[in-house]
Image: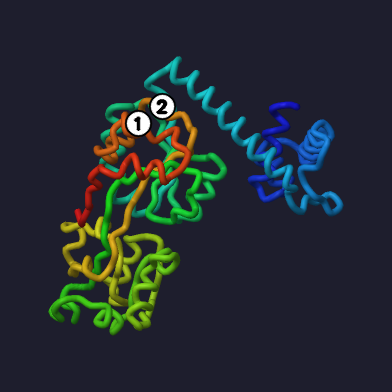
Amino acid sequence: MKFQQLRYLVSVHENGLNITAAARQLHTSQPGVSRQLKMLEQELGFQLFEREGRALTRTTPAGEEIIARASNILREMHNIRRTSAELRKADGGSLSIATTHTQARYILPEVIRAFRAKYPKVRLHLHQGTSEQIAEMVAKDRVDFAMATGSDDLFLQLVRLPVYRWHRTVVVPQGHALVDAGKLSLKKLVEFPIITYVFSFSGRSSLQAMFDKAGLTPDVALTARDSDVIKTYVRLGLGVGILASVAVERAADSDLAVLDARHLFDSHLTWIGFRRGALLRAYMYEFIELLAPHLSRRLVRETEKLGSQLEVDAVLADIRIPIKDMH
């Protein structure tokens, strides 16, 4: 059994059993990947995949177990290389973060500036996407940290640490009818077209579920993944914006009226996560603490080896999670 064969096996799995795509990712030939997989199966004495002709159709139960173990081996090899790099050069390296537009645009800039001042030789890579896209990057081991809100079922393999809580807020152009309409209600909101996030209308605690519970049907005029896009179309008069309060800036958005909606919508928790069993370098603990001062290095280390998120939550049960509002 060769290390190269394990790399090929995991890559084929990550690419949806598409050998051509795996070969492209590995910078090798398709026949070479197929040959190594067959050699590995011959050595193991059982099939890893079911086939129709030359195409792989599904992973066998035995294959699933071998792939899981191979993934762990590759991850540990990555950790060994990272340990070596840390011992040789403590102030260098890289840090890859997958997150949403809102976090990248409104939360991370000051954190990254402070981090860069302390670790100028660390290469930072910031990847933006939806929760599903972030989960895919995590599954393929392409990032060190994921930072998102909710979507727990997509990130069961991560240790998730609470960063801050936030509320939805409502924004309208100055002079809009809702500005002088008194205390905001869902009934008042459904009188106008709504502009909000794409992901806000999916999931168990979705915005849509809140309207459904009240027996109301909102007119969703437009959805977007980008807070700035939502505000742009609100300014054009296309509807009432519902977005994260952290995405509203007092100075830059002074042309918009901000309406308090904390009594209407549940709060949300934004977290930062890393793969269970991953090796965190010294500067990674520092990044977490710059982002969330309540997450000390000692506390993060306590959570690293825990076997489940329930255990992590129990360790962090007594910490005070800050609430962030508009800038």
From the viewer's perspective, tell me whether residue 278 is left or right of residue 103: right
Q: Is residue 239 above or below residue 243?
A: below
Q: Quadrant of the N terminus?
A: top right
Give the distance between the C-alpha atoms of the residues marked 1 and 2, in whole angstroms. 7 Å
Q: Is residue 220 above or below residue 89?
A: below
Instruction: Count all numbered tags in the image, as a single digit.
Output: 2
Color scheme of the displayed model: rainbow
Residue at the spot 67% in from the left edge and 37% down from the top edge: 26
Q: Which mark is residue 128?
A: none
Q: Outermost residue, top direction?
A: 88
Whether pointer 1 and pointer 2 mark residues with C-beta atoms closer than 8 Å, the reply is: yes
Residue 187 rendering spot, x and y as whole percentages: 27, 82
In terms of image quadrants, where is residue 36? top right
Secondary structure under badge 2? loop
User: Which residue occupies the foreground of this view, 180 or 310?
Assistant: 310
Badge 2, how many Cα within 10 Å: few under 14, some, many 20+?
some
In terms of image quadrants, where is residue 198? bottom left
Residue identified by numbered label 1: 285
User: Which residue occupies the foreground of this view, 287 or 158?
Assistant: 158
Residue 157 rendering spot, x and y as whole percentages: 50, 44
Residue at the spot 71% in from the left edge and 49% down from the top edge: 17
From the viewer's perspective, tell me whether residue 44 is left or right of residue 203: right
What amino acid is labelled 1 in the image? Answer: Tyr
Residue at the spot 50% in from the left edge and 50% down from the top edge: 135
Secondary structure under badge 1? helix
User: Which residue occupies the foreground of this view, 221 or 45?
Assistant: 45
From the viewer's perspective, tell me whether residue 244 is left or right of residue 82: left
Residue at the spot 56% in from the left edge and 32% down from the top edge: 75
In terms of image quadrants, where is residue 207? bottom left
Residue identified by numbered label 2: 281
